[in-house]
Image (cartoon, rainbow, N blue to C red):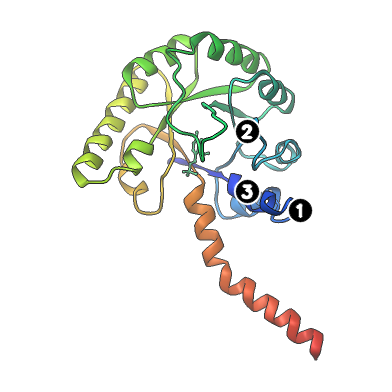
C-alpha cells in the first residue's frame, strides 16, 4: 500500500487571493481524510503566500493520521516546525520568485545548512525527509545526513514532453528508488503527479508515499462546481419564496 498525502496548499491559495476566511484548508483536510487521505501535507513558505501559521497549528490538532510539513531550512520556519511538531518534516528548496517548488533540494551543496535544520527537527522528535532529485549522489548524502526518508521529485517525469523522455525519467525514478532502498531510506515521491501519470510511478516497487496537491485540488474545484452552483440557486430561490 502506498500512502497518499494530500497537499492542500492551493485551498489556501484561493483563500489568500481574497485574504478571506474561506475556503479553509483545515476543513479541506478533514474532508480529504474522510475521502481516504493517509496524510495531509502543507508547505509553510517563508513568504506565507498560501498556508499560514494558524493553519499549521490547527492542522496539528485536527490531523491525527500523518501531518507532513514541507519547509525550507530557514531558521524561523524550522523553529515553528519544532514547536508545532508535525509527524514528518520534508525539507524543500525555496525561492521567492518561483511558482512552485522547482527541483529538489541540493543537499550536496547545502549539506551544512541541511544538517543544522535536521538536527533541530530531529531533536524535537520529528521524522525528516529530504526532497531531492533522483540523483545517486544526492541520495548518498541524504543517507550520510541521517534522513529517515527521501521524497524523490517527480517533476522531470511529469513534465516529460515525449514518450521516450517519459520512459527515461521513469527508469531514473526506478533506479533512484532501488538505490535509496539499498541505503535503508524510505522512498516518497511527489510533484506534478496527476490522475494519469500516477499510474506508472505507482508500479515502482518500494515507493511508500505520494504527496499530491495541484491535480487533486484542481479536480475538487471541478467536481464540486455543479453542486456549489445548484446550492447558490437554491439559496436565491428560497429567499424569494
Ligand atoms: N512534494 C513537494 C516536496 C512539493 O513541494 C509539492 C508542491 O508543494 C508537492 C509534493 C505536490 O506537488 P503538486 O502540487 O504538483 O502535486
The relative height of residue 74 versus residue 227 in the rendered view (above or below) is above
Q: Where is residue 108 in the image (x, y as percent from the top left)?
A: 42, 13
* Residue closest to the eye, 59 or 237: 237
The relative height of residue 225 versus residue 213 in the rendered view (above or below) is below
Sequence-wise first label, 2 or 1 = 1
The relative height of residue 64 versus residue 31 in the rendered view (above or below) is above
Q: Where is residue 226 in the image (x, y as percent from the top left)?
A: 57, 74
Residue at image coords 38%, 17%: 138
Q: Does the residue labelled 1 lie within 8 Å of ligand 1?
A: no
Q: What element carries label 2?
A: loop
Q: Distance from label 2 to label 1 (Cα)?
A: 19 Å
Rendering quarter of residue 71: top right
* Residue closest to the eye, 109 or 33: 109
Relative to residue 212, is residue 59 drawn left or right? right
Rendering quarter of residue 73: top right
Task: Point out the image quarter for the N terminus.
Answer: top left
Q: Where is residue 170 in the image (x, y as percent from the top left)?
A: 27, 37
Q: What element carries label 3?
A: helix
Direction bottom: furthest residue: 241
Rendering quarter of residue 184: top left
Residue at image coords 38%, 26%: 133
Which residue does the numbered mark 2 point to in the structure image?
45
CB of mark 2 within 8 Å of CB of mark 1?
Answer: no
Q: Is mark 1 on a helix, strand or loop?
A: loop
Which residue does the numbered mark 1 point to in the structure image?
21
Graded by Cα atoms within 10 Å as few (under 14), some (14 to 19) or many (20 or more), the crowding at tag 2 reads many
Q: Distance from label 3 to label 2 (Cα)?
A: 12 Å
Which residue does the numbered mark 3 point to in the structure image?
13
The relative height of residue 196 versus residue 120 in the rendered view (above or below) is below
Residue 8 makes an appearance in the image = no
Amino acid at each position: 500500500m502506498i500512502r497518499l498525502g494530500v497537499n492542500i496548499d492551493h485551498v489556501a491559495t484561493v483563500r489568500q487571493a481574497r485574504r478571506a476566511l474561506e475556503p479553509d484548508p483545515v476543513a479541506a483536510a478533514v474532508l480529504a481524510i474522510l475521502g481516504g487521505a493517509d496524510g495531509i501535507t502543507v508547505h509553510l513558505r517563508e513568504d506565507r503566500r498560501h498556508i499560514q501559521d494558524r493553519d499549521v497549528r490547527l492542522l496539528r490538532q485536527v490531523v491525527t493520521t500523518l501531518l507532513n510539513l514541507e519547509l525550507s531550512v530557514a531558521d524561523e520556519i524550522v523553529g515553528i516546525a519544532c514547536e508545532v511538531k508535525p509527524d514528518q518534516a520534508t525539507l524543500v528548496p525555496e525561492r521567492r520568485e518561483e511558482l512552485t517548488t522547482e527541483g529538489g533540494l541540493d543537499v550536496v551543496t547545502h549539506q551544512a545548512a541541511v544538517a543544522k535544520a535536521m538536527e533541530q527537527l530531529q531533536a524535537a522528535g520529528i521524522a525528516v525527509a529530504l526532497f531531492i532529485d533522483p540523483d545517486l549522489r544526492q541520495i548518498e548524502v541524504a543517507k550520510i545526513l541521517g534522513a529517515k526518508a527521501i521524497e524523490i521529485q517527480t517533476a522531470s517525469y511529469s513534465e516529460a514532453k515525449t514518450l521516450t523522455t517519459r520512459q527515461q525519467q521513469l527508469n531514473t525514478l526506478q533506479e533512484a528508488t532501488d538505490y535509496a532502498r539499498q541505503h535503508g531510506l524510505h522512498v516518497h515521491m511527489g510533484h506534478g503527479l496527476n490522475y494519469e501519470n500516477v499510474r506508472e510511478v505507482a508500479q515502482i516497487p518500494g515507493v511508500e508515499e505520494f504527496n499530491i496537491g495541484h491535480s487533486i485540488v484542481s479536480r475538487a474545484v471541478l467536481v464540486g462546481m455543479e453542486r456549489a452552483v445548484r446550492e447558490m440557486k437554491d439559496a436565491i430561490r428560497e429567499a424569494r419564496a
